[in-house]
Amino acid sequence: MVKRGPYGKGIERREQILDAALRTIAERGFFATSVAELAEAVGLSQGGLLHYFGSKEELFVAVLRRRDEADLSAAADRTPEALIEVVRRNAQVPGLIELFTHMQAAAADPRHPAHFYMRERYRIGLEGFSTSLRDMRDAGKLPAHVDPDAAAVTLFALADGLQSRWLIDPSFDMAAHLELCWRNLIR
């Protein structure tokens, strides 16, 4: 359904900006992409671009939310295997890993726009992942000794840490290490 009127046009423009920002950051890298370049890519001034988001930090949080939507649709079953595939796919978009890692560190400050985003991302992600692990355990696909909540926290934290490590050395196979941890956990 096409939105009509100024509100619909604003939503459409915001979506165009997010698509361009996601693509540009994925291709060029977070640190190599400026807000001026993003604005130019969609035919706006920097001020015009930021009008849709309020600040560059809010723009970057919105980009991460968009990336999360794609990851969630790719890993809808929220299994460890799906998480491993998301990490494997992330290796193809280093700029988004740079952005995520940067915003994750900035989110430690409760005043930063990424703070609420990261808290919600982990809350929602861990709830879904824990539920999936609990279902696997109840179906006999996960050993009874595995605590689904602790396993979910561990695998999420490991995935984030491996991405940070990978930024330092891109030859590092983060998906293989996450998979190894998963196999050891279910032994």
Image: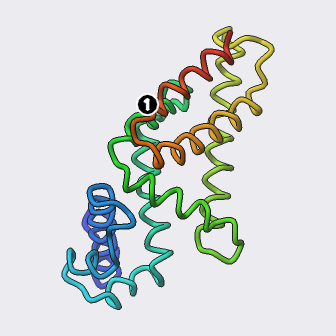
Residue 154 vertical position relative to residue 20 in the rendered view, above or below? above
Please identify the quadrant where the C terminus is shown: top right
Which amino acid, by three-letter code, is at mark 1? Glu
Q: Choose between 166 and 182: the one closer to the eye.
A: 166
Left or right: 158 in relation to 17: right
Q: Choose between 91 and 56: the one closer to the eye.
A: 91
Residue that numbered label 1 is attached to: 85
Residue 39, given in percent of the width and then of the height, sits at: 27, 80
Q: Choose between 94 and 71: the one closer to the eye.
A: 94
Quadrant of the rendered structure where residue 142 is? top right
Question: Please, which colouring scheme is shown?
Answer: rainbow
Residue 73 vertical position relative to residue 136 in the rendered view, above or below? below
Q: Helix, strand or loop at disc 1? A: helix
Residue at point 50% right, 57% down?
100
Number of residue marks: 1
Left or right: 122 in relation to 39: right
Quadrant of the rendered structure where residue 183 is? top right
Could you classify mark 1 by the number of other residues whose Cα lies within 10 Å: few (under 14), some (14-19), or many (20 or more)? Answer: some
Left or right: 42 in relation to 84: left
Residue at point 32% right, 70% down?
33
Left or right: 1 in relation to 53: left
Residue 57, given in percent of the width and then of the height, sits at: 50, 75
Q: Choose between 22 and 76: the one closer to the eye.
A: 22
Please identify the quadrant where the N terminus is shown: bottom left
Residue 120, given in percent of the width and then of the height, sits at: 65, 57
Residue 4, given in percent of the width and then of the height, sits at: 27, 76
Quadrant of the rendered structure where residue 44 is? bottom left
Residue at point 62% right, 37% down?
158
